[in-house]
Image: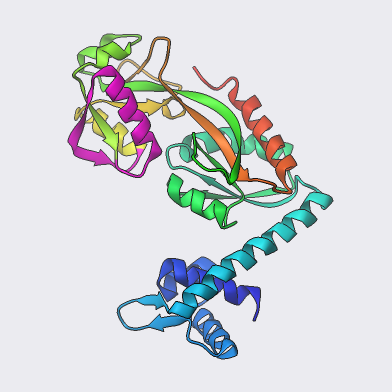
Amino acid sequence: MNLRELEYLVAVDEERHFNRAAERCFVSQPTLSGQLKKLEEELGVMLIDRNTRHVSMTDVGIAVVQQARKILKEVKVVKEIAQSFDDPMAGELNVGLIPTIAPYLLPEIIPELKQHFPRLKLWLHEHLTRVLLEKLKNAELDLLILALPVESDEFSVIELFQEAFWLVVPSNETLSKKNNIQLTDLKEQEMLLLEEGHCLRGQALDICFTAGATENNTFRATSLETLRHMVSEGMGMTLLPELSVPKERSKSDAVHYIPFDEPKPNRRIGMLYRKGSYREEAYQKIAQVIKDKLSGCFF
C-alpha cells in the first residue's frame, strides 16, 4: 500500500468515474484502475462496486476511504512542518477562491505575490464556497480567499478588505443618469441575480430586501459576466462587487455603473486556513501583501 493508491481511491470516491479520477490524478485510466485493483488484492476486500452504469464504494470501501483522507491530511501536515523550517515562503500552496472573486482579484495580486515571494508556487482553484470549505477541511487546499463570515470553528480567519457593491444598469434606464445612488432608489426595482450556491447571491438578496427591491425570478445567472451581458442587452439591472467594475468607463457604454452613497452596501473578503497550520507565518505575509496592494485599487 502506498500514498498514491490512497489518492486514487479518494479521487474515485469523489468523482464516481474512473476516467475523471485518472485525469484529476494525472495518470491514465488503466494505471489508476490497475493500482486500485492491486490495493483491493492486498487488503483482501472489494473497495469499489464497478458496473456499466456507475461507480460507487462498497461499505468497506467507504470506511477505508474515510481513513485514507485522514492519512493524506496528516501527510500534508508533515510536509508543512518540513517546509516551515526550511523556508515558509517557498514551495507549493493550493489556494481556493470563489468565482465572484477569482477573475478580478488575481490579476491585481498575482504579480505582487510573485515579486515578493519568487520561490512560492501557487496552484489556483476556483469553486463555490461549500466546495472550498470541504476541500480545506480535507487538506486538499491550503488557503481560501472568499466572502465572510464563514460559520466554522475549524479555520482561522484573516480579514483582507471590504468591497462595495455598485448598481449596474442599461444606458437607457432612468437611473443611469445618476452619478450616485441611495438604497431607497432601488425600491420596487427588479434585480437580476446569480443562481443558488453563490454566496454573493445571498448578499445581493439582503441588499434588495433592505432597499425594497425584488428579484427577477425568470432568470438566474451562472457568473458575474453573464449578469453584465444581460444588463448590456437591456434585460434588467444588477449589483456587482467593486473589483468587477471596469476602471475605464465611457458614457457611451451600453452599461452604466453607479456607486452608492454612504453607507455603501459591501461585502467582507477574507482568508481562511486550518487552525494550527505550521505555515501560518506564510499566510500572514501573503495577506499583508494583498492588503497593501488593494489599499489603492478601489474607486
Please tell me which residue is depicted at 39% across the width and 75% down the height of the picture. 56
- Give above or below for 57 relative to 94: below
- What colour scheme does the image use? rainbow
In reply to whether residue 208 is colored magenta, the answer given is yes
Q: Quadrant of the N terminus?
A: bottom right
Residue 188 shows up from this direction: yes
Q: Between 236 and 213, which is closer to the camera in this rendering?
A: 213
**In the image, 84: left or right of 12?**
right
Total numbered circles: 0
**In the image, 278: left or right of 104?**
right
Query: Which region is colored magenta?
Result: 195-223
Residue 149 at x, y = what percent? Answer: 49, 34
- Give above or below for 137 relative to 245: below
Residue 57 at x, y = what percent? Answer: 43, 76
In reply to whether residue 235 is colored magenta, the answer given is no
- Give above or below for 169 relative to 91: above
Residue 267 at x, y = what percent? Answer: 45, 27
Residue 255 shows up from this direction: no
Q: Between 91 and 37, which is closer to the camera in this rendering?
A: 37
Question: Where, by quadrant of the figure, is residue 287 drawn?
Answer: top right
Q: Between 216 and 278, which is closer to the camera in this rendering?
A: 278
**In the image, 35: left or right of 278?**
left
Please tell me which residue is depicted at 53% across the width and 72% down the height of the picture. 65
Task: Name the residue at the right extreme.
Answer: 86
Please tell me which residue is depicted at 74% across the width and 47% down the height of the picture. 119
**In the image, 216: left or right of 120?**
left
Question: Where, by quadrant of the figure, is residue 54 drawn?
Answer: bottom left
Please tell me which residue is depicted at 75% across the width and 49% down the height of the picture. 90
